[in-house]
Amino acid sequence: MLLAALLAIATQVPAGEGYSALGTEPFWSVSIENGRMTYESLNGPNFSVAAPAPTQIYNGRAFAADRLILSLTHASAATA
């Protein structure tokens, strides 16, 4: 069983709308749309699972499925 734990910074995932995040080193992306949570990586394996209902966590929300955990943490953008 593959368990991927990803941390993404977001302001909010509006109800009924999608969400996507990506990262580098290694290159990956995760999205939530149309009732599915999808993980893709250049090195694979890529997969999609039913999007679970979010749970409230400190300063954000978490979406926890059998093969994928996505934590969205609220943060302000850094100013230069």
Image (spheres, grey):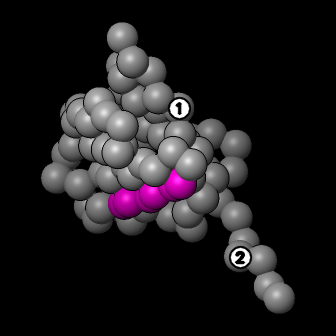
On the picture, is 26 further left or further right than 33? right
- Is most of the magenta stretch helix, strand or loop? strand
Task: Using a 10 Å C-alpha cutoff, classify the residue at mark 2 as few (fewer than 14 neighbours), some (14 to 19) or many (20 or more).
Answer: few
Residue 11 picture location, percent across and down: 57, 67
On the picture, is 70 further left or further right than 37? right
Rendered residue at 44%/37% (across/down): 63
Q: What quarter of the picture does the N terminus occupy? A: top left
Residue at the spot of label 1: 5
Element assignment for label 2: loop
Q: Is residue 15 above or below residue 66?
A: below
Task: Using a 10 Å C-alpha cutoff, classify the residue at mark 1 as few (fewer than 14 neighbours), some (14 to 19) or many (20 or more).
Answer: few
Q: Which mark is residue 65?
A: none
> Based on the displayed image, in which of its 4 quarters is residue 66 positioned?
top left
The three-letter code of the residue at mark 1 reads: Ala
**Relative depth, front residue between 25 and 9:** 25
Element assignment for label 1: strand
Residue 5 picture location, percent across and down: 53, 32
Residue 49 picture location, percent across and down: 24, 32
Residue 43 picture location, percent across and down: 36, 37
- Tell me the magenta residue range: 19-24
Hey, which residue is sitting farthest left in the picture? 34
Hey, which residue is sitting farthest right in the picture? 80
On the picture, is 79 further left or further right than 47? right
Q: Is residue 68 visible?
A: yes
Is 35 part of what is drawn in magenta? no
Rendered residue at 51%/55% (across/down): 23
Q: Is residue 63 above or below residue 10?
A: above
On the picture, is 70 further left or further right than 43? right
The three-letter code of the residue at mark 2 reads: Ala
Residue at the spot of label 2: 77
Q: What quarter of the picture does the C terminus occupy? A: bottom right
Rendered residue at 23%/54% (across/down): 33
